[in-house]
Image (cartoon, rainbow, N blue to C red):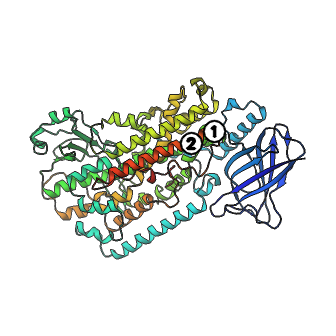
Amino acid sequence: MFTYRVTVATGTTYYSGTNNYIYVSLIGEKGTSQRTKLDKWLQNDLERGSVDEYEVKSERELGSIWWVQLEKVKFLVEDDWFCRYLTVCTPSGDVLHFPCYRWMSEENVICVRQGTAKRPFDDKMPELQSHRQKELQDRQKLYRWKLWKPGVTKCIEAETEADLHPDVKFDDDKRADFKHSFYVAIGELFLKKFVNMFGDSWDSLESFQRIFWRVKSVTGNFVVKHWKEDWFFGYQFKNGCNPCLIEKCREIPEKFPVTNKMVCQSLRGSTLEEEIKKGNIYIVDYKVLDGVPANVINGAQQYIVAPICLLYQDPENRLMPIAIQLRQVPGCDNPIFLPTDPENAWLLAKIWVRSSEFQLHQIVYHLCGTHLLGETFCIATLRQLPAVHPIFKLLTPHTRYTLEINTRARSDLLGKEGVIARVVASGGVGQDVIAQKGFQSFSYQAMCLPDNLKKRGTEGLKEYYYQEDGLQLWFAINKYVKGITELYYETDEDVLQDTELQAWIKDLAQEGFQDLPGIGIPSVLHTRDEMCKFLTMVIFTCSAQHAAVNNGQYDWSCWVPNSPCTMRQPPPVKKDNISIENLMETLPDMSQSAVQMAFTWHLGRPLPNKILLGSFDEEYFTEEGAKQIITEFQKDLEQIEKRIQERNKRLPLSYEYLKPSNIENSISI
């Protein structure tokens, strides 16, 4: 009789342990061990956070162990169990690691492969090939594509989070925090609405202070002091909640007939032609919003515009707005607003731009550009890559909780009765149109930060910290991905011969992006460089890019006039006679303002117990070579953190969103 010592680690979150029976069997090349119940006399086995050791007997030496089989049997009532990992110490003293990180629900059986990453052609035995195929077949039944809306990426087939498999749902700690923050937000909302219940429109800009109490955001308080100032208006295009739209102006578009006479005072005696040649003129164009139907809230029509804004980088490196046109087609009823116009006219024009920024940021750059993209990467990974595959091990930490947060968003935020429909100008039909038009403007090139920045021509834009920090992170992630993939793919031919990897990219292109062939997602990965770049994009999108467009939502929107979620009056058709009363009637009312503060806090708040970029509490890679590369990646992130901290000490307003200590590994909020 041969004795194997099996160590079993149970999850550390609430309700991870079980009182059901768990049986273990070892399956190897020479046979199968005895089926052994994990039960020690007078001991509470498989409790939350426990690491228990058991003896498993076998009548013969098993040789190479292919997998550990776990079987769950109900005792009185169903009691789910989360297994973190197992180790097996063989009779010869070898210790084998079996990463699991899966829930066992109801009475089922799972088979856990040994931790060494294997490509499909590494498994020579028919039994191992069959195991891979069955795992994928089972997963493809659990995780199915569904068309959410025409013209956007596909999503997971689930109406609510209850329809999701436990492996991709929030753990109980995460779920409890999510619910708690939601109730806190609702409590704040009702309190602020109660305090301001005797009124509709605000009577002055200062009156917004009546819902600004208890705001602890350093950036939010900075916004209150500076939001009217032109330099700060321009600053937000570089380092605000959406730093992804600004681009170099190479020529003034015909639809935006700005003349030298209009802007000569702003250009300090220079001309547009001279400053364009110097690379100092930038443009922000909200053309995606053109023609989008605006929401109707409580019977009242709301309004959306598609402005164009011209900006000048002055000798002090400030990005100063010099001209704003609120609609795409020029005309006598569509004036070009200038800094030399009456104060209220210029301020209202900037507020309209900021409201358009709110719509475009939330739908195109936040929802479509991170959440929906991340969901397609997650679904394809679950459907096409078995747990033993090196790319599954690489990507799965960056897909954690994404399916649940997106499923919740579709029902709670974006549904017919969701928050967006109730307070945002682009809610309802508008959000669908913006998403469709936004995806039409996307490209694979634009998803890759270095290519994106090059296309937008921002290399000469000063104090653009999103660009500065983002590139550091992109190259650190790229180095990490290259290091991991080179362990398993020595040649380009290895990439082409990996049938599971090719099925993954094909599933993405042909299913996830089925309605979007123009984006240019490849359906085949031909070389190691192609693979490395694509995987870098996936990880960057699900971590750093999401942090850049998510984490500042409350900072920039808590002072409502700076980022109005809706506008209640049509845009001005002339510059004269714009009063403070006109501004107040246009800005969100008291109720809308309170809701905006509540839901942007809920979505953008710092999360407790978040898993940071480069942190792997679930260790999928067991090889020393891979562990060393992970350690190097963590050191690179530490250096980036230090450089950002040192730079921020010199700034009047720190740019914190791309500090590695503020970046989650995945899209989970």
**Residue behind mark 2:** 395
Residue 52 horizontal/vertical position (percent): 74, 58
Amino acid at circle 2 = Leu
Amino acid at circle 1 = Leu
- Tell me, yes or no, whether the two marked residues, 1 and 2, touch with CB atoms within 8 Å: yes
CA neighbours of label 1 inside 10 A, class few (<14), some (14 to 19), many (20+): many
**Residue behind mark 1:** 385
CA neighbours of label 2 inside 10 A, class few (<14), some (14 to 19), many (20+): many
Check the image and report above or below for 528 versus 198: above
Viewer-nearest residue: 372 or 333: 372
Residue 519 horizontal/vertical position (percent): 45, 34
Residue at (50, 29) in percent of width and height: 530
Viewer-nearest residue: 504 or 348: 504
Q: Quadrant of residue 46?
A: bottom right
Query: Which of pointers 1 and 2 indicates the residue nearer the eye?
Result: 2
Find numbered disc 2 in the image and state the secondary structure of the residue it sits on.
helix
Residue 476 horizontal/vertical position (percent): 46, 40
Q: Is residue 280 left or right of residue 76?
A: left
Q: Quadrant of residue 342?
A: bottom left
Q: In this view, does 137 lie to the left or right of 602?
A: right
Q: Residue 435 carries which label?
A: none
Viewer-nearest residue: 250 or 362: 250
Q: Can residue 618 be seen in this view?
A: yes
Q: Is residue 291 visible?
A: no
